[in-house]
Image (spheres, grey):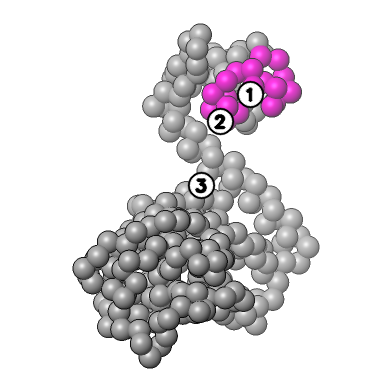
Amino acid sequence: MGYQIELRHFAYFLAVAEELHFRKAADRLFISQPGLSRQIKQMEEIMEVELFIRNRRKVSLTAAGEYLKKEMDYIFNHIDSTIKQTQLIDKGSDGEIRIGFLGSAVQTVIPSLLVKVNGEYPNIKFSLEEMSNHLQVEAIEKDELDLGFVRLARVPSGVQMKTVHVDTFSLVLPTDHHLDKKSFKNVAQVSNENFILFSSDYSSLYYDRIMSICEDKGFTPKVSHKSVHAQTIFKLIESGLGVAIVPTSLQYGFDLGVKFLEIPKISQKATLSVIWKKDNRNPALWKIMKFL
């Protein structure tokens, strides 16, 4: 066959794979639907694979299509990153490092890291985005992030992980709550109160550790609200809607009507880890690894 695979084929494939609808994908690409269908068919013929299952009701990816989409997500993200890094280097920069993080990392590790890096590599730029554990791992695998700060027990093959901070847990109460540092002994003293927790989707490891802190004292917490943002949790506590257990370092950076009581004599710790892709090709990343 005289045809060859070109970059546009992959761009067309990704649009259909994301939309799972040929007309919507064609509108997004500003081409006709019949033209898009021909391009995809041509691509399948060149590769000698079936990428989509088509019927009158819906379009879905085959197993081969699922694999190709995952790889194309990575390749296109890497191309975008490479172009941006090239532009930055051309302007005298040492490149950019993209960082994902959980909120508590901003209170502990990240500011110190940025200060140290800036002292030796002032021309490295950083972009920061608060994200859940799951989204950070996904973005690391797709080459959308260079570093992630997570609370996880394990990561997929090809992703490296290193512990960078170990924190204690604290009970968070409204300022006018009757418990204080002197009278607080253990979390069983609030077993009848409503708990406001970080969602398990945000960090299942962290959620499980909170539950185990309570279960070790003989009760299962009544969870009334969940959130992915510390400020939301603290605002609900300030309003008298419940109590929470969070990493102690989260007591800094918020000006709300809550108080933190560090939980004594428990084995559970809030472990923060940094993750990165083993084969990450960003030269700026490897310059700063010694600071981690």
Residue identifier under label 3: 142
Q: Amino acid at mark 3?
A: Lys
Is residue 183 among the parts visible in the rendering?
Answer: yes
- Helix, strand or loop status at disc 2: helix
Q: Is residue 270 above or below residue 59?
A: below
Is residue 283 at least partly visible in the picture?
Answer: no
Q: Does 179 appear in magenta?
A: no
Tell me which residue sits at (60%, 18%) in the image. Answer: 22
Please, what is the dominant secondary structure of the magenta stretch? Answer: helix
Span colored in magenta: 13-33
Q: Secondary structure at mark 1?
A: helix
- Residue located 48% across and 10% down the image: 55
| Neighbour tally class for label 1: few under 14, some 14-19, many 20 plus, Cα within 10 Å | many
Spatial distance from mark 3 to mark 1, Cα to Cα?
Answer: 22 Å
Q: 262 or 201, which lies in front?
A: 262
Kind of residue at disc 1: Ala
Q: Disc 3 versus disc 2: distance between alpha carbons?
A: 15 Å
- In the rendering, which numbered label is found on residue 25? 1
Q: Residue at x 41, y 77 (%)?
A: 170
Residue type, numbered disc 2: Glu
**Pair 3/2: label in front:** 2
Q: CA distance from mark 1 to mark 2?
A: 8 Å
Q: Which mark is residue 12?
A: none
Residue 148 x/y as whole percent: 50, 61
Q: Does the stretch in magenta take in 14?
A: yes
- Pointer 2 residue: 18
Q: Residue at x 55, y 14 (%)?
A: 41
| Pointers 1 and 2 in contact (C-beta within 8 Å) | yes
Residue 97 image position (x, y, % from top left): 61, 63
